[in-house]
Image (spheres, grey):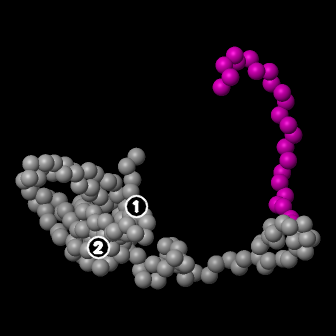
Amino acid sequence: MNSCILMAEIVQEPQLRYTQDNQLEVVEMMVEFSGLRAEDPPSTLKVVGWGNLAREIQESYHQGDRVILEGRLNMNTIDRQEGFKEKRAELTVSRIHSVTAAAQGASRPLVPSTTATSTPRPQSIPEPARAAVGVPAMTSQVPATTPARDTYPDAPAVPDEDDIPF
């Protein structure tokens, strides 16, 4: 399966154009992302979006924005004037997400915060006996009561007359 998720910065303003029959929008932009190691230079990649997503990208995203791109990676072969062929990677985007300045830090996950009240977490109960034997204390306590269940008698044993095991 060809699936790619990439966090990058838009380095070229998204350019909206249309297919030859003027039926479908296409947006192209260049993004830049850091290398795997600190000493690696940043890499650039062409990103293409189609249809309603193309219009959304052109209207909502601009040069300098940090985004998370989801899509599929393609390799295009281009004939160069110098007489050789060059391969270039291109990401066809299927989803795009904005990365806010607060979420860029490593201490916060990239999950939207909810404003609704959440259920309170159980208090941590110290367990000195567990600490004495070198087992870390639990951070939450599971309720001691279990919900009541109806019990049913075991079904009578029926001989298996089928030779096939499934």
What secondary structure is the stretch in magenta mostly built from? loop
Q: Quadrant of the C terminus?
A: top right
- 99 over 18 or under it: above or below: below
Task: Determine contact: label 1, label 2, CB under 8 Å.
Answer: no
Q: Position of residue 157 (x, y in %)?
A: 84, 27
Residue at 29%, 73% (x, y): give it: 10
Label 2: which secondary element: strand
Which residue type carries mark 1?
Ile
Q: Quadrant of residue 66?
A: bottom left
Q: Which residues are magenta?
A: 144-166
- 130 over 71 or under it: above or below: below
Label 1: which secondary element: strand
Q: Residue 10 shows which numbered tag? A: 2
* Category of crowding for the residue at label 2, using alpha-carbon neighbours closer than 10 angstroms: few (below 14), some (14–19), many (at least 20): many
Q: Quadrant of residue 39?
A: bottom left
Q: Is residue 20 left or right of residue 91?
A: left
Is 91 colored magenta in this rendering? no
